[in-house]
Amino acid sequence: MSYSDRNLSCVDCGNSFTFTAEDQEYHASRGFENEPKRCQSCRANRKADRGDTRGGGGGGGGYRQMHDVVCAECGRNTQVPFQPTGSRPVYCSECFSKRAPVSSRY
């Protein structure tokens, strides 16, 4: 299929942005059926507002909040990328990697 650049309007700011032929081809190759609704800056603002730090696309740069904990196995101070609730043990990366994988319940 042949693609050509298309101008779209951002649903957040109303500014026009280009959905390039290359981007359209990429979207099609991934099976995406919907065209983008937001310009690049509004997408970045939306990700920042919801704390999305995956940094997909071109380079990341997002801040990932870390939480101080004590490993339940070795007692070493460490940090984890989630807020522990206290309902389950938390391990340092070394002790976590030694543990047997949990089998799926499904």
Image: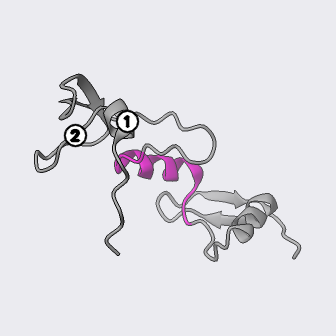
**Which structural element holds mark 2?**
loop
> Which residue is label 2 attached to?
90
Residue 23 within the segment the image draws in magenta: no
Q: Between label 1 and label 2, give the one nearer the viewer.
A: 2
> Which residue is label 1 attached to?
64
**Which structural element holds mark 1?**
loop
Q: Nearer the viewer, residue 93 or 57?
A: 93
Residue at the extreme left: 86
At label 1, which amino acid type do we have? Arg
Give how far across and how far down residue 94 sits, in percent.
36, 30
Considering the image in quadrants, where does the N terminus appear? bottom right
Query: Are there few (<14), some (14-19), or many (20+) residues within 10 Å of tag 1?
Result: few
Magenta-tinted stretch = 37-52
- At x 78% / y 65%, what residue is drawn? 25
Is 86 situated above or below 18?
above
Query: Could you tell me what secondary structure mostly forms the magenta stretch?
Result: helix
Tell me: 5 left or right of 69. right
- At x 22% / y 22%, what residue is drawn? 77
Is 2 situated above or below 63?
below
Q: Find residue 7 and report its image quarter.
A: bottom right
- Asked if the residues shown at circle 1 and circle 2 are in contact, with their CB atoms under 8 angstroms apart, the answer is no
Residue at the extreme top: 77
